[in-house]
Amino acid sequence: GDKIIISVPTGNFGNILASYYAGRMGLPVKTYICASNENKVLFDFFGSGEYDRNREFHVTSSPSMDILISSNLERLIYHVCGNDAERNAEFMAKLSSKGKYTITDDMRKQLDIFYGGFCDEKQTSEAIRSLYEKTGYIIDTHTAVASGVYNEYRKKTGDDTPTVIASTASPYKFTRSVMTAINPDYEDMGDFELVDELEKLSKVKTPKAIDEIRNAPARHNIVCEPADMWNEIKAFLIKAADTP
């Protein structure tokens, strides 16, 4: 029955919403930490009550969180507006027409269980490096955002409640970003060299899918200019039609 905290790297608000539903079903959660990258539309929302997608879009090392419209947030808004579908639809209509909406103060009070934070690219890399140096454990860029925001939360609040950090991807999926965060000297190595180094450092075997890519024969090797793409497609279709 002891309370826990859950920190989730969040772009589309899916995994953290699942955590929220787990809490409604009885999991004793004290705080849900909504961790964003530089596309911090959710961080701003929890701080101000205004959701505004009208902003610069950033391409980051945690691409699954590079999102300005968090579609699953609609489900949370539905609950805090009294499970009123028509009212909820009005907020979403404003998002579509104006790119933003603002919830009421009463609705914001119901979101006190959420804490919003964000990591920029430098902080994300630091979270990967510091955890590896302290423990030898290697995390991917998305998990690093959740870890970095949790560390910020703990420093800011002094809250040492046991915390679950949702790890949502393998470091092997973002090998270059992960390895250069640990040591910038890795930047000069090739992709598969980095995979081998990651296996050595993490002591976790390279996923089979990556090994298959390493050894797979090239099936397509055509390079063309954009203006020639249609002709290449037609040639490919003709060849495919003639193949038994």
Image (cartoon, rainbow, N blue to C red):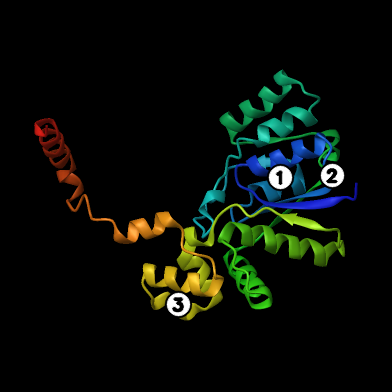
Alpha carbons under labels 1 and 3: distance apart: 37 Å
Where residue 70 sits in the image (x, y, percent)?
61, 40
User: Which secondary structure, mark 2?
Assistant: loop
Mark 3 or 2, closer to the camera = 3
Alpha carbons under labels 3 and 2: distance apart: 42 Å
Residue position for label 1: 45
Choose between 85 and 166: the one closer to the eye. Answer: 166
Where residue 135 sits in the image (x, y, percent)?
67, 74
Alpha carbons under labels 1 and 2: distance apart: 12 Å
Name which residue type carries label 3.
Tyr
Of pointers 1 and 2, the one earlier in the residue sequence: 1
Where residue 102 sits in the image (x, y, percent)?
72, 36
The residue sitting at 81% across, 67% down in the picture is 155
The residue sitting at 77% across, 23% down in the picture is 83
The residue sitting at 46% across, 74% down in the picture is 197
Residue position for label 3: 186
Question: Compared to 238, does 16 lie above or below?
Answer: below
Residue position for label 2: 112
